[in-house]
Amino acid sequence: MSSLLVDNIGELVTNGTGEGPLGIRRDAAVLVEEGRVVWVGPSAYAPAADRRLDAGGAAVLPGFVDSHAHLVFAGDRAAEFAARMAGEPYTGGGIRTTVGATRAATDDELRATVRRLRGEALRQGTTTMEIKSGYGLTVADEARSLRIAAESSTETTFLGAHVVPAEYAVRPDDYVELVCGPMLAAAAPYAKWVDVFCEQGAFDVDHARAILAAGQAAGLGVRIHANQLGPGPGVQLGVELDAASVDHCTHLSDADVDALAGTAHSDGSGTRTVATLLPGAEFSTRSPYPNARRLLDAGVTVALATDCNPGSSYTSSMPFCVALAVREMRMTPAEAVWAATAGGARALRRDDIGVLTPGARADLVVLDAPSYLHLAYRPGVPLIRQVMRNGVTP
Ligand SMILES: [Zn+2]
């Protein structure tokens, strides 16, 4: 059994016991055995190990947990982005452009895109990345999207209800029946989660409830795209169905915030539905950001994720999202880093990632900086010196 000691860590973010909300330890070391953290403590008292990684006084934090990404697609929507920056509004209708390109792509083309984006994210410190389907929208194309996603992540999500495809535009009820029946059956073997885009112009609350309930009955956990483009019933539906996460949360009523806060326990235990904020989407569509302070001040558990997709948020960078959360959503740097690590883990109902405490997976990031503060303080700068997954450099 080979052990690895990461020592001489100037600032270690554990998200466990330590100073402040991030559980910070100074001059610390982490001992890793068989891909797991087995000891955390002062560098001066570190046990011996077979190998050593000297962090050189830099900051070390848990690998980022990106709990919301759409990586299985083909095509490019740069022209749509340019048009939007020139003043055209974002409606979500461009999803159909990507659906056409995705259906026409080969498996290898889709696989290459997933691997490219997954690698890009990894180099920016993302050690866990959720991947959704949702650009196939036929039984065969959704199943193959998830089969390909499952090659790169265990956190895979069936999003057959991303948009009603053009061929079902005049009979959306029939499409919902397809999603709940044969499409779910073909997708479920490769999926851990089910998700619905519950929004005006996408799926209404009755359709969303039917699809999520069918997914639950097939053994999948629930997540939902809710209240992104306007107010609506999505957040409350998510809470009602014990969703792991309600994502976007840009337009919330007081009742929505209360519903989310009602699911959280003040000691952090038993926290259920997480509010996942995706500021890359507001940045890329030039839209008002969600009110993170209102959620945090109400005691809601908040996660940050990229929403990486070719239309509304084509970034794979969690450090960029941390910087946006601090600058544009008034989260403190500590809140943003927690949300991008432990918060993402909660949004995936995982307790073995997003923390660096004994028993956790040895998924960690060594920064080219003395403190996690630099993630927000130095936006756009490549600060990830080294990434480890399961105790090894991938
Ligand atoms: Zn999304």
Image: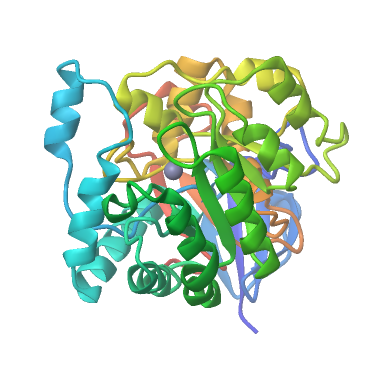
Locate residue 154: give its quadrant: bottom right
Locate residue 279: give its quadrant: top left
Q: Position of residue 95 (x, y in %)?
A: 29, 44
**Measured along the vertical axis of the image, is residue 280 above or below residue 111?**
above
Q: Where is residue 109 in the image (x, y as percent from the top left)?
A: 19, 69
**Measured along the vertical axis of the image, is residue 237 above or below residue 241?**
above
Most distant residue in the front direction: 170
Q: Position of residue 38 (x, y in %)?
A: 74, 65
Q: Which image quadrant shows ligand 1? A: top left
Locate residue 92: give its quadrant: top left
**Measured along the vertical axis of the image, is residue 350 above or below residue 203?**
below
Q: Which residue is drawn at 23% across and 60% down?
A: 102
In the drawing, does residue 108 fall left or right of residue 392? Answer: left
* The one of 308 and 366 positioned closer to us in this rendering: 308
Q: Where, quadrant-wise, is the N terminus in this rendering?
A: bottom right
Q: Can residue 207 be seen in this view?
A: yes
Q: Where is residue 187 in the image (x, y as percent from the top left)?
A: 48, 71
Q: Which residue is drawn at 69% across and 33% down?
A: 236
Q: Is residue 154 visible?
A: no
In the drawing, does residue 185 fall left or right of residue 343? Answer: left
* The one of 322 and 301 positioned closer to us in this rendering: 301
Most distant residue in the left direction: 79
Q: How is the image coloured?
A: rainbow
In the drawing, does residue 166 fall left or right of residue 346? Answer: left
Q: Residue at x 28, y 37 (%)?
A: 93
